[in-house]
Image: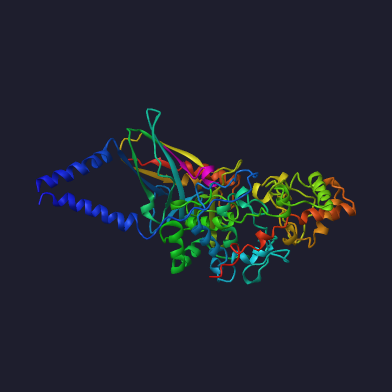
Amino acid sequence: MPKSLLYAWLIFTPFILNAQKDMTGITLHFNPILNGKPIQDGILTGHINDDSIAIHTLRFYLGNFVFYKNGKEVGQDASGYHLLDMEDANTMTISLLIAADYDAIRFTLGTDSLTNASGAMGGDLDPTKGMYWAWNSGYINAKIEGYAKKCPTRNHQFEFHIGGYMPPFQTVQQVELQGIAKQEIRVDMELSAFFEQIDLGVTHGVMSPSATASEMAKLLAKTFRLHEQ
Amino acid sequence: MSNKLPLAVIFMGIAYWFLVAASPFSSPDPVPLKYPESWPKPTYDFTKNPLTRQGIELGRRLFYDPILSKDSTVSCSNCHLSYTAFTHVDHALSHGIHDRIGTRNSPALMNLAWGSKFMWDGAANHLDMQALAPISSPVEMDETIENVVQKLGRESRYKALFHHAFGDSTVTGERLLKALSQFELNLISANSKYDQMKRGEAVFNEQENKGYVLFQNNCARCHAEPFFTNHGFEKNGLPIDTTLNDLGRMAITQLSADSLKFKVPTLRNIEFSHPYMHDGRFRKLREVLNHYAQNKELGIELTANEKVDLTAFLLTLTDKEFLFNADFAFPKN
């Protein structure tokens, strides 16, 4: 019996050691908020620009995670794009492995142009995820939908499908989080930074690549920030 | 006793090999894309979607199956019939579900591995993604890819076909689109009299030769050999149809310079792909040539005799082996 245990130890130990070698993980929890208020019953509500806003859909792609230490790149993640969906809490947490010490992380909000023009893809990029345009090829990098009293639309709905990869209306954005000291961090997305800049009485529907969509992508990228402890 | 554990490990390894690694699923059979040596390399990236016998077969079943539409009445082949160069013969504007009529003439399908933008306005940036447009169009199939994937996943025959093509029976949007691409990529037309003449297997008569010279001098800039399209977008002098107000490429690029530009269609099998132009406004080749000859801006001058010669050349682009290829037609079994 001890001999057989020895065999098992000899066979499996190298695999176990290899898996643990120098790998540190990071878990990022993305937490959408509106005026500091978290999601309640699946909806974000708040008062912005003298308007009552309710957001029921927030879906977006994150990817191309790159890690930095003292301003220098120390590693990249190769797990591809992640589709985050406010309605599915599991998707709002991303765990990545990195074989280095880091203090900052950069990632893209949205998909790059190569991904948009490379044909059918699977996983979170599968076109069944509802994030691909049929009539104008390309991914919808972010969907934001909800209601606002000022919207002069049916049921006061607003619908922003933000995408576009061809110049001059690209929508992919870089986001950087600095001062990361822990392996498990909370990232708030304060959507008031987005809605404060939009007059929902005028702009309530974006469905194709445009200057407005590009501007909205920039605004959405500004909503990310490390949660204050 | 002490030897039993290693023996068990070895036994489990052997069992794993037989059960999983060497399961009844054998890898799909690779199929090389056959095309003339003189043609350039395809633009389609086959490393991401290697052609296989089983993949092409699955794609063919999907292409001919109305399950892709909302009420299972319309398949791809409704507007892309194999015997008419995979276009919708006789219909200026193609019709789809519930006889709803679209705004364009369905394009002929062939030699798609060399294309980079698809549809009359280039809306689809990749062959894989093109099928999303007709599936979701309310006047074509009026369905969603999510629903199609669910419907296929409930059908045991499709589960088996996906298993054969991709190694397991899971139906995904990616696999559905890639299988359709495989069938479409396989539609190669390269055996017309023109192709045979190029290979030294056939000889043009005098009229066809004259027509070929006229073609090279007047048409080949856009309808470039050997695909008889430069795969670009051009304005060919057609006045806008005010019942459609179709601005073409501009709708995609939002550039005013692209107003009224449409994709240059291939001329291969043009004898069978009528009616012509993006809105099918011309029923006869004669009308097409008259349009080009009458438009002064295009600088194409053709006498009546020259039109006849040019038509004789255009008819050499008919590839009956392609048109009546049983492997491309409705799967009978």
Q: Please give the name of the residue rendered at 46% of the width and 63% of the height, measured from the top-left corner.
A: B161
Between A59 and B103, the one nearer to me in the picture = B103
x then y, percent, for residue B330: 59, 67
Q: Is residue B193 left or right of residue B124?
A: right
x then y, percent, for residue A167: 60, 41
Q: Is residue B231 left or right of residue A158?
A: right
* Residue A202 lies within the magenta run: no
Q: Is residue B250 above or below residue B18?
A: above
Q: Is residue B243 left or right of residue A23?
A: right
* Residue sticking out furthest to the front: B201
Could you tell me how many numbered marks the image carries? 0
x then y, percent, for residue A209: 59, 48
| Residue A102: quarter of image | top left
Between A146 and B199, the one nearer to me in the picture = B199
Between B329 and B109, the one nearer to me in the picture = B329
Q: Is residue B17 visible?
A: yes
* Residue A115 lies within the magenta run: yes
x then y, percent, for residue B141: 59, 65
| Residue B63: quarter of image | bottom right
Q: Which residues are magenta?
A: A106-117
Q: By what rule are the colours in the image chosen?
A: rainbow
Q: Please give the name of the residue rendered at 11% of the width and 49% of the height, measured from the top-left corner.
A: B2
Q: Please give the name of the residue rendered at 78% of the width and 50% of the height, measured from the top-left corner.
A: B236
Q: Is residue B283 above or below residue A16?
A: below
Q: Is residue B155 visible?
A: no
Q: Is residue B328 left or right of residue A181?
A: right
